[in-house]
Image: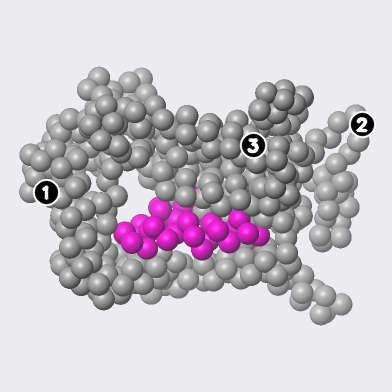
Amino acid sequence: MQAFLMRSQRVPYSWAYAIFGPMENRGERNQSSVADGFSSHRLNQRWWHSLPFIVITAFLLRLAVITVGHTYRITPNRDHFQFGWEMGRLARSIALDRGFGSPTDLSTGPSAWAPPVYPYILAGIFKIFGIYSNASAWMILAFNSTFGALTCATIYSTARKMYGISVARAASWTWALFPYAIYWPVRVVWEASLSAFLLSLVLLITLRMPDQSPKPQIWIGFGVLWGFLALTNTALISMLPLFLGWLLYRLQWKRQQMMGACLCLVMTALTISPWIARNYSTFGKFVFIRDNLSLELYLANNDRSSGLWTRSQHPGNDPEAMQQFHDLGEIAFMEQKSRQFREFIREQPGKFVVFTLERAAYFWIGTPQNATIGKHNFLPLRHLAYFLSSALSFIGLWLTLRSRRSGAFLLACLLLLYPLPYYLVNPFPRYKHPIEPVLIMLIVYAIYMRRRSENTVNS
């Protein structure tokens, strides 16, 4: 192990390579493949193709929507509960020096309702700009928009490595300008935009690591990044074994790199261990980062449910459930919901299966929420838009797999395996947002390949 740890040299370059790929140095120009036949020199003369310009445009556009559209003016109903919902309540508790707790309107003490990163970010902004103030709302939406814009860079670099520079530019511009991609950072106070960026960054680094034999520092940083990702969006940690397995396969299962993967796992565990230790010290039992999964499972699977979220039984919305949450305490309340969920499965397994299949469909075609404007119901159109975008992304995945492109397995994992937990709970659209950079990239690739095949036939 000591010899393994002593092998690293040129660490800054190694990290730059892992994220951005080969750099242009020593007078050499990076000759990227250009699938559409134009020369790299000719394309690079177009200033609007530059990655910094795309990122800056995306950021300024999002800030303009926040400022001009007044999206920071969140309704004050129920003391601004819509400002981050439980996340906002946790942040308020932290900002008031009451600790990480009270995720509902009532003071219920310490909590593990959500991963800690985003509530602490909110709390820091609350401390500086005021709790539930317009200034705080503007700042947190600007924070979201920063990572929404930076995702253009990770999309660009990933698509460039997998598909070439033409797809990379089209995909990054699509993310920069697409209204749906703009909506989440400028309207929703949640970790979705930060999670999307972090997951796209993890994907990019994973794709880059086999290009050079990863040094120990790369594995250490990779593990810390995964730990930070888990403390931001715990569901994403499910991808870690798959990403590591793909890496070791590409690295030919060499002993040195297997030790590096073990080092990555150790660093991931060390990164999340302080929070797990806090949970154990606070609740007297092991809680892996967050504890509300049993509640989410019960809310989507009970006698009064139609397969989707039963809002009337959620402690954040229902006064009776909120009072019960207060009286029992968080851990006892979650344990009760776990028992009720298991009881429902035992008594009505068929209904649980039907609910799960319906939620799997809604994850990809959009939930059947109210879409009425005036006298017109736009729900069918909403479902159609979601369906077409999902279908195009799966076509892009199929084309990627068929052409045996490096990283196709990782994209398949994100589309096929990442959503599985959400088929068991309510498939909120924001739960899909972390993988939407990949979906955009695959959609652009599918359209690009279609146009190229048409040009080939016409010529």
Residue 10 screen position, x and y as percent: 77, 24
Q: Considering the numbered disc 1 on the image, is that residue within a helix, a strand or a loop?
A: helix
* Mark 1 or mark 2: whose residue is earlier in sequence: 2
* Mark 2 or mark 3: whose residue is earlier in sequence: 2
> Mark 2: which amino acid?
Gly
Label 1, label 2: how far apart the Cα atoms are: 66 Å
Q: Is 409 within the magenta?
A: yes
Q: Farthest residue toward the right?
A: 27
Lateral position of residue 355 relative to residue 157, left or right: left
Occupied quadrant, residue 300: bottom left
> Mark 3: which amino acid?
Met
Residue at 66% from the left image edge and 47% from the top image edge = 248
- The label nearer to you, 2 versus 3, is 3
Res 447 visible? no
Residue topped by disc 3: 259
Residue at 70% from the left image edge and 47% from the top image edge = 253
**What number is the disc on residue 321?**
1
Residue 319 screen position, x and y as percent: 9, 47
Q: Which residues are magenta?
A: 408-434
Lateral position of residue 202 relative to residue 421, left or right: right
Lateral position of residue 371 relative to residue 195, left or right: left
Q: Is 194 within the magenta?
A: no
> Mark 1: which amino acid?
Ala
Q: Which one is in front, 68 or 38?
A: 38
Residue at 20% from the left image edge and 68% from the top image edge = 346
Tell me if label 2 and label 3 are in contact, CB under 8 Å. Answer: no
Residue 345 screen position, x and y as percent: 23, 66
- The label nearer to you, 1 versus 3, is 3
Residue at 27% from the left image edge and 64% from the top image edge = 308
Q: Measured along the vertical axis of the image, is residue 221 above or below residue 179?
A: above
Occupied quadrant, residue 289: top left
